[in-house]
Structures are given as C-alpha cells and as structure tokens.
Amino acid sequence: MTPPAADAPFVHPALFYRDEREYLDGTTAFVHDGLHAGEPVAVAVPGERLRMLRAALGPTARDVHFVDMSQAGRNPGRIIPGVLRAFADAQAADRVRIIGEPIWPGRSEAEYPACVQHEALINEAFDGRPVTILCPYDASGLAPRVLADAYATHPVVIESGRRRASPRYAPERVVASYNTPLPEPFRAAAFTFDEERLRAARQFAVQLAGGFGLTGTRLDDLALAVSELTTNSVLHGGGSGVIRLWTEDGHVVCEVSDGGRLSDPLAGRRVPPHGIPGGRGLLMVNLVADLVRTHCAADGTAIRLYLAL
C-alpha cells in the first residue's frame, strides 16, 4: 500500500511511550485537540490505562466515549467492526478521532498475529474516511519485533514528542507475513462434514465442548460460530470440510477447514450495509469469539476460534 498523502482524510499514527508521563502527554493532547475542533472522541485502551487517562482528563472526561479494550478488543478481529466502526459510524460529525491500543504487554503469542494483522488492516478499512486513530505502544514493555511491526503498520510514528513518516510502512506485507500455518494441537477430535452432515457437525461440536466444560451462553456462542463456519464451507469452500476441537490454555478451541480460498483480508471485519442480506457469518464469529485466527492458502482455508472456559 502506498503511504497516504499528508492531507489524506484518514490519519493513523503510532505513539511510542516509555513511561506514564509520555503516555498522558501524548493521549491527553490528542483528546483535547479533538474536542477543541468539535470532533467526537473515543478512547479504547486496556483497563488500567483507561482509568489513568480518565483521571488525567478530569471534567473533560465526560465528553469522551470510553471503552475497555482488554474486554471489547480481546479478540482483535472484532475491534474494527465492534469498536472503531461502531463509534465512527454512529457520529454525525464530519471527522472523528479515536485512541485505540490493541497491543499491550501480556498479550499471548496466540493473540499477537491477529493483533498485528488488525493494525495493518485498519489502513484499508478506513482508507478515505475522515478519521484519526492514534495507537499507543508501550516502548519499554513490548518486544522489539512488536515495535518494528508498528513501523510497518502505521504511516506515521510519534516518538519523544517528534512526529515523522515511517520509513518502513508496508501493511500489506505484514498481513501476508503473519498468514502462516496455525500450530498443530497436541490432540484434537475431528469430524468430516458436507451439506447432509451440517447438523451432525454442530451436534458433535456442542457435545464435545460441553464435555470440556463450556456452558450457558458460551456454549450457545460456539453453536452459532460452528453453524456459520460449516455453512460457509459448504457454500463457498468446496461443499465439505473438517471440524476439530480441543482445549488449550483454558480455552475450548474449534477449527473449521475446507478447500475454499478466503481472498478478502477484511472478511469478518466489514459491516455490510443495512438491508443487504448475507456477508455476516464471519462477522458473527468475530463478535462472539475471544480470539479468531485464520490461515489462507491456495489450497484451502482454516479458521480457528477460541472461547474461554
């Protein structure tokens, strides 16, 4: 993707901070500038940072929409539709601004590829829209590769109060480089399905997940996700597929693979226009799962979702 022009409608800087002072200096100035310009402002950062920023803003905080990113953005795949677009699309103003911090120390190795792909895909999702999204990065607590990836996913970087164009901006390369085969589970139960065995596939998944300890609405979420994914396999993935389930690090993990090719990297992150049928299956999966990982290859696609026990 070509770096955007300096006067492009969409602005997407990364803010590197090393301590609380740098964090608050950069974020509060961003909020105050937006409110002064009459722009609606949202802040979506992890809970501890959220409380810190709310306190620093004082009475001004009542004019800001706050979201706990550690909850709303636990699955990076739902941040664009469920956090960023949800706020931007609801505003009547010409321009909006958002602080979004999707990557923080403590994110797991399983989550990180989805996080960095999210940061790259923001550029395509908001291209041409009058939105500014500032993404803070804890430069003292995150690994060097995370900061290197931030240079590739953000056209502008702010560090030590200085703003400059990123010399390594390449979001499409980032999306491709993290599209790698998913790690094989130690042990998984598998079920092959086709159009006639869709119901049996869902029953297989629900019964097994219930045996793992998934209950209530979480089990309903799994049933919904399995129904959407297996139906997509039949309709768009060659007519059949394989579903596998196992447990991993306190989660029930469900993977659906088929022979189809998912060519749209924003699939599941776009909100279809109102009144247009279809196109919501992967979106629903992103909205209910705690994490979604995808591997797309020339000979097939695997979509893996995690639900916390």
Image (cartoon, rainbow, N blue to C red):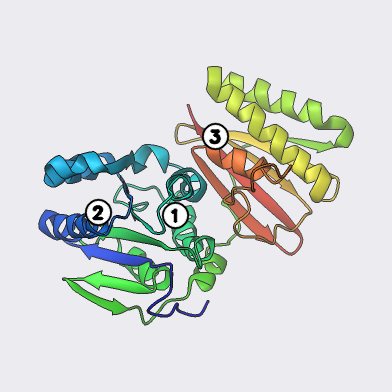
Q: Position of residue 168 (x, y in %)?
A: 40, 79
Q: CA distance from mark 2 to mark 3?
A: 33 Å
Location of residue 198 with respect to 108 vertically, above or below: above
Q: Which residue is mark 3?
A: 288
Q: Please indicate whether residue 200 sits to the left or right of residue 293 in the image.
A: right
Q: What residue is shown at x 54% (from left), y 38% (from top)?
A: 287
Q: Position of residue 274 (x, y in %)?
A: 64, 43
The three-letter code of the residue at mark 2 reads: Leu
Dot 1: few (<14), some (14–19), or many (≥20) neighbours within 10 Å?
A: many
Q: Earlier in the sequence, mark 3 or mark 1?
A: 1
The three-letter code of the residue at mark 3 reads: Val
2 or 1: mark nearer the eye:
2
The three-letter code of the residue at mark 1 reads: Cys
**SS at circle 2:** helix
Label total for image: 3
| Residue situated furthest top in the rendering | 216
Q: Which residue is mark 1?
A: 115
Q: Which residue is mark 2?
A: 35
Dot 3: few (<14), some (14–19), or many (≥20) neighbours within 10 Å?
A: many
The reply to whether callout 2 and callout 3 are in contact (CB within 8 Å) is no
Q: Please indicate whether residue 132 sits to the left or right of residue 25 in the image.
A: right
2 or 3: mark nearer the eye:
2
Q: Earlier in the sequence, mark 2 or mark 3?
A: 2
Q: Position of residue 142 (x, y in %)?
A: 28, 59
The reply to whether callout 2 and callout 1 are in contact (CB within 8 Å) is no
Q: Nearer the viewer, residue 56 or 35?
A: 35
